[in-house]
Image (tube, grey):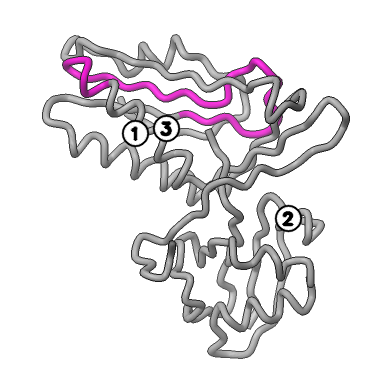
Amino acid sequence: MSHVELVETPLDPTSLEASIAGPDCGAVLVFVGRVRNHHAGRSVERLTYSAYRPLALQAMQRIVDDLESAAEGPLRATIVHRLGDVEAGAASVIIAVASAHRAAAYDASREALERLKREVPIWKREHYADGEAVWREEERLVAPDDAGAS
Amino acid sequence: MRIRVLGFASVQDVFGEEEVTLELEEGATTAALEKALIAQYPMLADTWPRLAIAVDGALVPGDQQTLLSDGCEVALLPPVSGG
C-alpha cells in the first residue's frame, strides 16, 4: 500500500519495503536518506527536522498520487520522513517504490526525492560540533498557480 | 479580525514561539499582514521576500492580494530543506 507519513521514531527500511512489495512488481527500490556528519566543511552532530504538518502530508501525498497516476503499469510509492532530532548517521527519510519493471522504479524514486526537496514544508536545523545551530533554507515554495514566482 | 500566524524555522526564532496572534481590520489582505508583522518584528523585513505564505493550509500566490478572515490560520514558510 502506498502511504505517506511523518514520524518521530527511528525509521525501518525493511518493513517499508515489505509493505510496498507485491507479486505484481518485479522491482522494489528503497532510498534511505541519512544524516551526514559534515556540511560545507563543518562537523555536524545532528539535525532537527520540523514541518508544517497538514501541508507537508498533503504535498507528500500529491507526489505519491502523481507518480502512481503517471505510471503505465503498477506503481506504488511510500514516503516516510522523520521529524525531531536525528543524529548523524541515522535515517531521516525513506522513499520506497515498487513497479513492474526497474526503469519506472528508478525514475519514480528519483523524482519523489527531488519533489520532496522542492515542495514539502519540512525544514532541517543543523547542529554543528562547535555548538552553533542554523536553519537551512534552500528551496522556496511556490503556489501552484503563482504567476509571479521565479 | 483575529489572525493566527504560525512561524516555522527562522521565522519561529524571530517570533520566539510557534504561533503569534494579530488583530487586523476587516477586509485585510496578506499585504496588511506583512505590514503589521514587520512593524512588530522588524527582523522579518529581510526574510519576507523569501517566504511562502499559506492561508488555512493552502499556499497562496505571492501577489499579496489574498483576503484574510477572522480566525484564519496563516503560516509563514521559509525556503524548505526537507529530505
- Say which quadrant the N terminus of chain A sits in: top left
Classify 10 Å Cα crowding around label 3: few (below 14), some (14-19), many (20 and above): many
Q: What secondary structure is marked by label 3? A: helix
Question: What label does residue A65 carry, if any?
Answer: none
Q: Are marks 3 and 1 on the same chain?
A: yes
Instruction: Give the residue furthest to the right.
Output: A130
Query: Which residue corresponds to mark 1?
Result: A111
Query: Which residue corresponds to mark 2?
Result: B12
Query: Is B28 rendered above or below residue A126?
Result: below
Chain ID of residue with mark 2: B
Residue A118 position in % (x across, y down): 46, 45
Residue B31 highlighted magenta (yes or no): no
Residue A94 position in % (x across, y down): 47, 23
Q: Are marks 1 and 2 on the same chain?
A: no
Q: What secondary structure is marked by label 1? A: helix
In depth, the one of A12 and A44 nearer the eye is: A44
Mark 3 touches mark 1? (CB < 8 Å): yes
Residue at 48 percent of width and 70 percent of height: B62
Classify 10 Å Cα crowding around label 2: few (below 14), some (14-19), many (20 and above): some
Q: Amino acid at mark 2?
A: Gln
Residue B71 position in % (x across, y down): 59, 74
Chain ID of residue with mark 1: A
Query: Which residue corresponds to mark 3?
Result: A113
Viewer-side label of 2, 3: 3
Q: Amino acid at mark 1?
A: Glu
Residue A100 highlighted magenta (yes or no): yes
Per the picture, the main secondary structure of the magenta-coloured stretch is strand
Viewer-side label of 1, 2: 1
Q: Which residues are magenta?
A: A80-105
Residue at 43 percent of width and 65 percent of height: A149
